[in-house]
Amino acid sequence: MTDLPADKGACLTMLRDMDRDRYLACLLAPEDKRGDLAALYAFNAEIARIRDVVREPLPGEVRMQWWRDLLEGNPHGDSVGHPVAAALLNAIATHNLPRQTLIDMIEARIFDLYDDVFENRNALEGYAGETASALIQLSSIVLSPDDAARKAETAGHAGVAQAMAGMLLLMPLHRRRGQVYVPQDVLSAAGLNRESFLEGKDREKVGAAIEIFCAHAQDHLNKARQTSLPKAVVPAFLPVAQVEAVLKAARRAGADVVENGIQLSLLRRQWLLAKAAYLKRF
């Protein structure tokens, strides 16, 4: 691997500890693109973890505003020395990335700071579209702008599937916090509401909600797979290669997903990414 500028190297190091899957995706990308991909992924990791480091929503919103100000051209003094901020601004300038898409990612992540429930699957898809799908699309622009434009719909479906798989993996953590990412219409279809889902006493109904959730994610994954990917943008989609394995594990686990969780081993995750990189499909 070629040496990266200090800021981008710091982003890659950060990903190794905070987002191993996207770290591996960076390593499987062309050398001249790794630093800018790492900057995008590190930014995503920074805003995604805000709920983990604050006790109340207001301090979280302050942190979100810090990033929003940076992207709107009103950086705070301490942003100059922030490696992720510096690397992100460089990536934006190098690849003419749309700042509004990044701002929309921040706005969507405000949902994470609270314990509200998505009203329906459309609301969930909107959240996933502005977070995971947007990240795939931005990464595709870094890799190949022309191919990114042609595969925007694929990125949309792939991102929704990936986001939903991530929600399944994090369900035990979300439950401890009192968060529910299963939309209200899915809960209602299973005969549940937010409180009864968190209680988990009716395992049959909780399992039914998980099944409906997984089926919806699988539908998006199937739609994303309908067309082949241009070779240039494959690295942007590599983390999606784990989605189907997560969905299968969640369906087997049923209600246990909420309490005990599911995890793929690091070795299996590495193998799935490497396989996707070799076959040029996820």
Image (cartoon, rainbow, N blue to C red):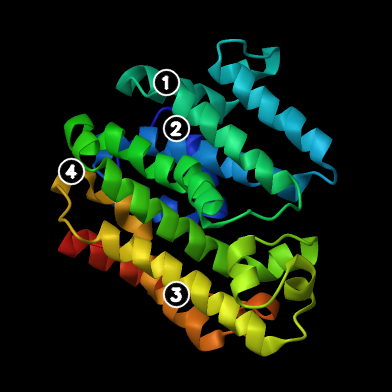
| 2 vs 4, front mark | 4
Residue that badge 1 annotates: 90
Q: Earlier in the sequence, mark 2 or mark 4?
A: 2
**Which amino acid type is shown beneath numbered disc 3?**
Leu
Q: Report if residue 103 is visible in the image.
A: yes
**Residue 10 at x, y percent in the picture:** 51, 36
Residue farthest to the right?
A: 56
**What residue sits 25% from the left and 63% below the top?**
276
Q: Is residue 266 left or right of residue 205?
A: left
Residue that badge 2 annotates: 8
Tell me the quarter of the image containing the C terminus: bottom left
Residue that badge 3 annotates: 247
Circle 1/circle 2 CB separation < 8 Å? yes
User: Measured along the vertical axis of the image, is residue 227 above or below residue 135?
Assistant: below
Q: Earlier in the sequence, mark 3 or mark 4?
A: 4
Q: Specify few, some or many for label 4: CA neighbours under 10 Å numbering under 14, 14-19, or 20 or more.
A: some
**Which amino acid type is shown beneath numbered disc 4?**
Ala
**Residue 137 at x, y percent in the picture:** 34, 39
Q: Specify few, some or many for label 1: CA neighbours under 10 Å numbering under 14, 14-19, or 20 or more.
A: some
Secondary structure type for disc 4: helix
